[in-house]
Image (spheres, grey):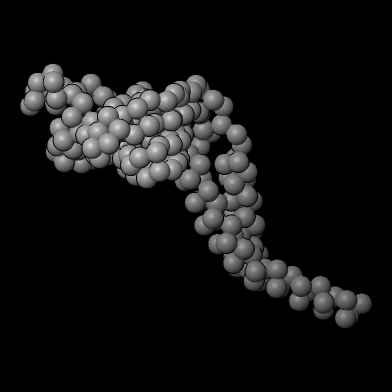
Amino acid sequence: MKRWSILLGRCGTTLVAIGLALFLVSLIPSPSLGGFGGNDYISGQTWQTRYGNVMTPQQILSVTITTNGTLDIYVLEVDSLTVYNWISERSGMAGFSDVANFDQFLESNPTSIAWQGQIHDGTISHEYVPTKVVNVTLAIANHSPDVASSDYEGSLSRSLAPVSKVQTISEITVPVGIVLTLPWLSNLLKVRRREKASG
């Protein structure tokens, strides 16, 4: 059997093993670091914060929000005090909850938006994993003139590794490993057939 075939086979089986191991690691339940939740009403043309904390890439923020109206949900990579101070400098204390002032902050600081979603008479769920140590704020904005209910719950958990990244690596390594292993398996079957035929 050719050496290159054996070498590729060994590399392939190693990649398959690594990929499967990473996939199994991604399935391990993450230990909880705490949770939050509640229900509230958000007046028309206002915004509120629901959660704020410093997060690391080993942590996962999971949130689920339900409303009977239309709400915009934001995960911001900035602490809420920074937003409030920015608004206060431009519109004073009275402008804290004004959604137009919040929108101006987002337009001036687009890189602070890690994720944005919208709900209309329904439920939305999202999992957020930061790529660095960062302040994180969960904000809810009501751009409509009508009052909207907000039932929300969330949890912070610790991950052994970022789930999406680990699963992506696994999805790449396993097929590549299988492709590299095929020539070795093919040659191995040929050798065994010859041995049976000669025996």
Question: Where residue 150 appears, x then y in whole percent?
Answer: 39, 31
- Quadrant hosting residue 15: bottom right
Task: Name the residue at the front extreme.
Answer: 146
Question: Where residue 34 appears, x then y in whole percent?
Answer: 50, 21
Question: Where residue 64 appears, x then y in whole percent?
Answer: 46, 35
Q: Quick check: 190 above or below 26?
A: below
In depth, the one of 28 and 138 nearer the eye is 138
Task: Name the residue at the right extreme.
Answer: 199
In depth, the one of 13 and 39 nearer the eye is 39
Question: Where residue 143 appears, x then y in whole percent?
Answer: 24, 39
Task: Name the residue at the bottom extreme.
Answer: 197
Residue at point 59%, 67% (across, down): 179
Residue at point 48%, 45% (across, down): 164
The image shows a total of numbered marks equal to 0
Question: Can residue 59 be seen?
Answer: no
- Quadrant hosting residue 89: top left
Residue at point 40%, 43% (across, down): 121
Q: Say which quadrant the N terminus sits in.
A: bottom right
- Quadrant hosting residue 25: top right
Q: Say which quadrant the C terminus sits in.
A: bottom right
Residue at point 81%, 73% (across, down): 192
Task: Name the residue at the top extreme.
Answer: 93
Q: Horizontally, is 187 left or right of 160 in the view?
A: right
Q: Quick check: 192 above or below 6?
A: below
Question: Can residue 185 be seen?
Answer: yes
Q: Quick check: 86 above or below 181?
A: above
Q: Quick check: 83 above or below 185?
A: above
Q: Horizontally, is 134 left or right of 20 in the view?
A: left
In depth, the one of 4 and 46 nearer the eye is 46
Q: Horizontally, is 143 left or right of 170 in the view?
A: left
In depth, the one of 161 and 80 nearer the eye is 80
